[in-house]
Amino acid sequence: MNTDQKALQELLFQLADDDFILAYRGSEWLGLAPHIEEDVAFSSMSQDTMGHAVMFYEMLEELGAGTADDLAQLRKPQDFRNAVLVERPNGTGHYMEQPNYDWAYAVARTYLYELFKWVRLEALMSSSYQPLVQISRKMMTELRYHLMHWQTWTKHLAGGGQESRDRLQAAIAQVCQDIEGLFSFGPHADAIVAAGLIADASTLKARWLEKASDALAKNGLALPDAFPAPSHDGRAGEHTEQLADVLNTLSEVYRLDPAAAW
Amino acid sequence: MTEETLWSLLQEVKDPEIPAISLVEMGMVNKAVVEDGIVRIEVLPTFVGCPALEIMKRNISEIVGAAEGVKEVHVQFVFEPAWTSDRISEVGREKLKTFGIAPPPDLLQIEESFEAACPFCGSSQTRLDNLFGPAACRSILYCESCKNPFEAMKPV
């Protein structure tokens, strides 16, 4: 594999794995969201996001990286290229048992990630790889609705009284502990940018900062002044133990019989 | 088989989630060509993660594949051009209404809401209840006039 092919595959894994793992975290909220309408909405958005991951895995399949299902279900945690932010648990406990999940964190994480995703897709619309140009345009039409939804929740929580506001601001700070990891392109960053696949990390970060600051400022909220270096570089295959838990759960059935037809 | 026959066969393939409307009326069929019994069809997905896509593919293959003189059917999903909600035909928009779904309004520069007339009584006294509904392509609204909840296709 030459440098350009390797760069393309690395980028596709980042795109696919970010969406795949966050969609899984979103799906863990099913039945636990604040009200039934939110259950419908969050599940619908997780389904969109999972669908986006499938598209990226299928692009990898076209490039000969393996079948989309195998790529999603059979790789080891260290082969995943998602940023650590998306693998963080929803709270303490387990979705089956004592799920002490944090709704403010769900709102803050998903909103700030989806704003990043918007910026990333916008950048992909000028990619040298044509399939990414076409698919990003399509995904943005869907993402627009997600952003409206999370803006509504942000407004709701920011205006919902002192405790609600404090908890949302604290969740934003918590999310920002991991935010730098999103902007990393990992060990192949130079090759990814040199191949014209996407704008460089500092450009993406500047655009995100502008969008995220505006989105929060509408509700009198703000981002922290500085963002620490991430504890693990997910783009280099460094992950928390939680990713192994996620993969064990979501691929449990598939691993029983990878040859079964679905 | 002629292309005309092919398009009339495709008219028989319905949206699995809205059986009142065909894929052609939904504006999802981008191209349909036939050459020496080999049929090639390009379909534009409405939403990327729509779980009904595989069912549509299978239904197309079954219906077109059963026609006389057809040797092979190739269905491909493409994103160029992108499907947009204004591709739904006038007939399609009427059929959506009879099924109780408001057709998509024009795409506006909107922040948090969009408006659609009630498919049951036609009133525009409606409110958006949930941007997200039972399928990726639909939202849930409520009619203040006839007091019915209803779904509307999202403008995309």
Image (cartoon, coloured by chain):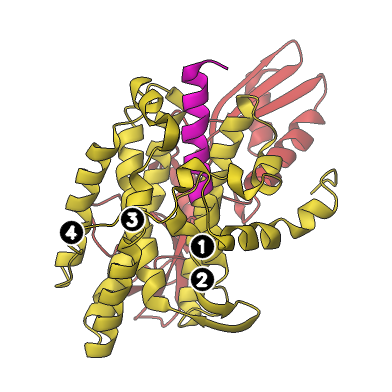
Residue denoted by label 1: A44
The reply to the same-chain question for discs 4 and 1 is: yes
> Is residue B5 found inside the magenta-colored segment of the image?
no
- Report x, y in % for residue A187: 43, 33
Q: Name the residue under label 3.
A: A179
Mark 4 or mark 1: which is in front? 4
Name the chain under label 1. Answer: A
The residue type indicated by label 1 comes to: Ser
Mark 1 nearby-residue class (10 Å; few <14, some 14–19, many ≥20): many
Amino acid type at circle 2 is Val
Q: Which chain is yellow?
A: A
Residue type, numbered disc 3 = Ile
Whether pointer 2 and pointer 1 mark residues with C-beta atoms closer than 8 Å, the reply is yes
**Image position of A140 (left or right of A202):** right
Q: Which of B17 and A146 is in front in this view?
A: A146
Label 4: chain? A
Q: Residue at x 45, y 51 (%)?
A: B93
Position above or below: A233 against A175 = above
Q: In the visual, does A46 lie left or right of B121?
A: right
Query: Residue B70: percent from the left, percent from the top?
Result: 79, 21
Q: In which quarter of the image is the N terminus of chain B?
A: top right
Which secondary structure is most common in the magenta stretch? helix
Q: Residue beneath label 2, please?
A: A40
Q: Mark 2 lies on which chain?
A: A
